[in-house]
Amino acid sequence: MLSRKMFYSAALVFATLLLMAGCSTVTTPAASASSAQPAGQAGGGPGLTQPVAVVNQQLTPSIGRGITVVGTGKASGTPDVANVNVGVETQADTVQQAVADNKTKMTSLLSALKELGIADKDIQTTNYGVYTQQQPSPDGKGMGPTSYHVNNQVNVTVRDVNKLGDVLDKVVAAGANNIYGVNFSVADTSKLQADARAEAFADAKERAESLAKLAGVTLGDVVSVSEVIGSNPVYEGARMAVATGLGGGGAPIQPGELEVNMSVQVTYAIK
């Protein structure tokens, strides 16, 4: 009799526990169609409903809505610095004579530059070479005599473009017979860059407002802004080549304008 009562008591406790577990079941989101299993088909065997393991997952913060645009801007200025390559090439029957002639003319050329107020730091040797040349004989039956050539080239920075024509005339008079690669620039480009950057930002805002209007939203605050890599800055200026053998009267020089291009990427929040 005692054993039977203990059996009924244990069964009653077990049933109570099952009832409590059923009442405290947490409803979980339905599984996706690809992973859902019909009741009674779970791994616990036919007719048994498998308990669902609930994992406390933190949802990834939602990415705020926004509009990202790239704006471009440019600013122009008058060049105030010029760079030009000038040099002397000499030819003689012996290498010693070619070197001596080149030295004489190059010394005269450098003296002329210094008389024009060009500082030593603005005169830099870019090339010095010696080579031979042999032409076919007049009768075409062999090779003629060998000649020796010496070439000495310097890059000159002229910090007043108004003097460039005078500089070219004087170096030619001093013996320069190679002149090429005249390039213009602006000594301080910070203001041009700032103006181009401001125009680029204004362009970006205008583009963003246009897109926002098309999307039926309103622009919010600026979320991020950065200069576009690879376009900081792009200079477009006047370039020219000067032929050898310039005559007197001043070489005609037109420095034109220097243009600075900048691009910025801006992201705006939207409301």
Image (spheres, helix red, strand yellow):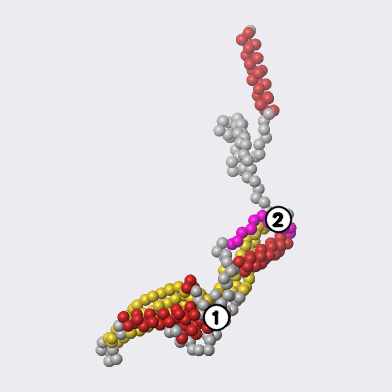
Q: Give me the residue at 64% from left, 56% from top.
A: 224
Task: Say if 37 sits above or below 139 in the image.
Answer: above
Q: Position of residue 66 (x, y in %)?
A: 67, 55
Residue 135 visible somewhere in the drawing? yes
Q: Which mark is residue 155?
A: none
**Quadrant location of residue 137?**
bottom left
Residue 38 visible somewhere in the drawing? no
Q: Position of residue 156 (x, y in %)?
A: 48, 76
Q: Give me the residue at 30% from left, 85% from top.
A: 93
Q: Position of residue 202 (x, y in %)?
A: 68, 65
Q: Residue furthest left?
A: 141
Task: Say if 94 sits above or below 206 in the image.
Answer: below
Q: Give me the residue at 66% from left, 55% from top.
A: 223
**Quadrant location of residue 52?**
top right
Tell me the kind of residue under disc 1.
Lys
**Left or right placement of residue 149 versus residue 38 in this view:** left
Q: Position of residue 47 (x, y in %)?
A: 60, 30
Q: Viewer-proximal residue, 81 or 4?
A: 81
Q: Quadrant of the N terminus?
A: top right
Q: Viewer-proximal residue, 81 or 41?
A: 81
Camera-side mark, 1 or 2? 1
Q: Give me the residue at 64% from left, 17% from top.
A: 11
Cα separation between marks 1 and 2: 51 Å
**Left or right placement of residue 61 versus residue 164 in this view:** right
Q: Which residue is mark 2?
A: 221
Task: Say if 194 sits above or below 102 in the image.
Answer: above
Q: Could you tell me what secondary structure mostly forms the magenta stretch?
A: strand
Q: Which residue is mark 1?
A: 163
Magenta span of residues: 215-228
Q: Are marks 1 and 2 in contact (CB under 8 Å)?
A: no
